Image (cartoon, grey):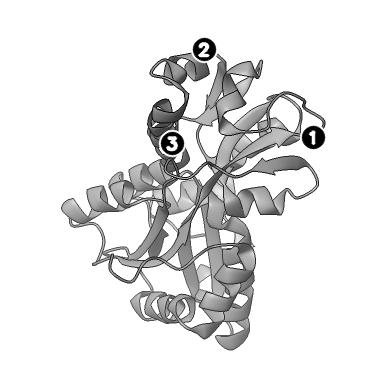
């Protein structure tokens, strides 16, 4: 299993393959940034069970990956951190019918040692906040949380929070990194990413009634070069091994009624 380099990304985008690429089958998976760690573990197991397959993982913001597919990038699977990006590809007949395979919960994180931010209502007290950009799944989820929180903290709460935002990032890992590095005081990220940064940030749960459930659909990309391998990876992801890996990473099952 290897990560997609910038050079290889350009090659695939242009429709070419590097020398020797036909020697071993390659499964190209576009994954939301928050799936990076768990998909790496699953891909390693998949390669071990399907020699001599290479799994190439390309992690980025779901909106970036969706745009790449729309512009003709080669991929076999696309896993999004929200339905919105997937629905756009589905409407354009660029993916097969998606399936929901995991859910996640946004949480508030504050940099280690920060005083004065103990709850969501304290966000306006922070000097530097960072959020995902509005078109990014974690950014859209965060905006929903902040808007709902106005019922608890006053109608001007969203405006007071917005006044403290110093950066809006293109994926959740970039958001989290700002807090870990001390470049921001607090942020809203997924619980799974917060868990991965355990000891580097302080995790604060959201109050009842304001949280949202982040949904993760996955689909085969139409025209992908490895439909059988893509289906096999889907089967792994939705089977016992996939469920165990997702649970260990902090993802939660989606309500069966959805």
Q: Earlier in the sequence, mark 1 or mark 3?
A: 1
Label 3 SS = helix
Q: Which residue is depicted at the point 37% across and 45% down? A: 68
Labels 1 and 3 touching (C-beta < 8 A): no
| Residue 80 is at least partly visible in this image | no
How many numbered discs, if any? Answer: 3
Task: State the image quarter where residue 181 is shown.
Answer: top right
In the picture shown, does residue 243 fall above or below 38? Answer: below
Q: Earlier in the sequence, mark 2 or mark 3?
A: 3
Residue 170 vs residue 156, the one in the foreground: 156
Task: State the image quarter where residue 189 is shown.
Answer: top right
Rounded to the nearest whole Å, what is the CA distance between mark 1 and mark 3? 23 Å
* Horizontal side, residue 25 vs residue 96: left or right: right
Badge 3 density bin: few <14, some 14–19, many ≥20, Cα 10 Å: many
x then y, percent, for residue 76: 38, 65
Q: Quadrant of the C terminus?
A: bottom left
In the picture shown, does residue 172 fall above or below 121? Answer: below
x then y, percent, for residue 51: 58, 85
In the picture shown, does residue 24 fall above or below 2? Answer: below
Q: Which residue matches tag 2?
A: 163
Rounded to the nearest whole Å, what is the CA distance between mark 2 and mark 3? 16 Å
| Residue 246 is at least partly visible in this image | yes
Q: Which residue matches tag 1?
A: 112
Labels 2 and 3 touching (C-beta < 8 A): no
Q: Which mark is residue 145?
A: 3
* Horizontal side, residue 70 vs residue 186: left or right: left
Task: State the image quarter where residue 180 is shown.
Answer: top right
Label 2 SS = loop
Badge 1 density bin: few <14, some 14–19, many ≥20, Cα 10 Å: some
Q: Which residue is depicted at the point 65% across and 48% down? A: 194
Mark in the foreground, 2 or 3: 3
């Amino acid at each position: 299993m290897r990560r997609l380099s910038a050079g290889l990304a350009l090659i695939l985008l242009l429709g070419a393959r590097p020398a020797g690429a036909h020697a071993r089958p390659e499964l190209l998976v576009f994954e939301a940034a928050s799936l990076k760690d768990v998909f790496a573990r699953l891909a390693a197991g998949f390669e071990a069970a399907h020699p001599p397959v290479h799994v190439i993982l390309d992690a980025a913001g779901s909106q970036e990956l969706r745009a790449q597919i729309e512009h003709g990038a080669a991929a076999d699977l696309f896993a999004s951190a929200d339905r919105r990006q997937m629905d756009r590809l589905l409407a354009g007949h660029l993916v097969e019918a998606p399936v929901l395979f995991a859910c996640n919960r946004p949480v508030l994180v504050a940099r280690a040692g920060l005083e004065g931010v103990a709850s969501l209502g304290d966000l306006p007290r922070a000097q530097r906040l960072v959020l995902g950009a509005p078109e990014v799944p974690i950014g859209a989820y965060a905006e929903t949380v902040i808007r709902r929180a106005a019922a608890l903290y006053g109608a001007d709460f969203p405006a007071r929070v917005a006044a403290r935002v110093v950066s809006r990032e293109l994926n959740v890992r970039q958001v989290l990194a700002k807090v870990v590095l001390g470049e921001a005081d607090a942020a809203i990220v997924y619980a799974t990413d917060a868990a991965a940064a355990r000891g580097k940030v302080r995790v604060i749960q959201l109050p009842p009634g304001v949280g949202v459930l982040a949904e993760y659909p996955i689909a085969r990309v139409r025209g992908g070069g490895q439909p059988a391998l893509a289906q096999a990876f889907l089967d792994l992801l939705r089977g016992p091994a996939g469920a165990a890996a997702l649970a260990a990473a902090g993802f939660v099952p989606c309500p069966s009624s959805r």
